[in-house]
């Protein structure tokens, strides 16, 4: 069975969560990576998201 999860966040949390997911065996689908601009308290920031998948028996 193919499991899917979405990782998202600002630059710092996105990188940390993506590294953790890869160490757990999740494979990021680089074609699904999206970056959008979001409005926060200190102005605009980049919000990143990516789909990760893993085969489970």
Image (cartoon, rainbow, N blue to C red):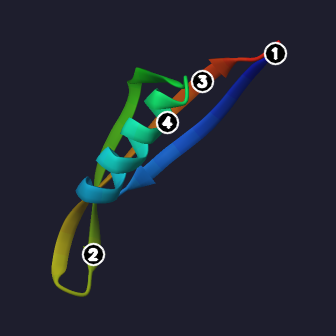
Percent coordinates x, y for residue 9 in the rendering: 38, 57
Tag shown at residue 37: none
Question: Mark number for residue 21?
Answer: 4
Outermost residue to the left: 43
Kindly report the distance in space between the C-alpha atoms of the residues bearing marks 2 and 3.
29 Å
Determine which residue is flagged by label 1.
1
For this orientation, the residue located farthest to the bottom is 41
Label at residue 39: 2
> Which structural element holds mark 1?
loop
Left/right of residue 1 with respect to residue 51 in the rendered view? right
Extreme residue in the front direction: 23
If you read the primary sequence from the N terminus, does the residue marked by circle 1 or circle 4 appear first? 1
Q: Verify CB contact (< 8 Å) between mark 2 and mark 3.
A: no
Which element carries disc 3, helix, strand or loop? strand
| Dots 1, 3 in contact, CB < 8 A | no
Q: Earlier in the sequence, mark 1 or mark 3?
A: 1
Say which quadrant the N terminus sits in: top right
The residue under label 3 is 53
Q: Are marks 1 and 4 in contact (CB under 8 Å)?
A: no
Task: Point out residue 34 in the picture as x, y percentages from the top left corner.
Answer: 35, 39
């Amino acid at each position: 069975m193919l499991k899917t999860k979405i990782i998202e966040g600002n630059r710092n949390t996105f990188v940390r969560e993506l590294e953790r997911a890869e160490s757990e065996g999740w494979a990021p689908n680089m074609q699904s990576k999206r970056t959008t601009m979001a409005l926060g308290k200190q102005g605009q920031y980049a919000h990143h998201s990516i789909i990760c998948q893993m085969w489970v028996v």
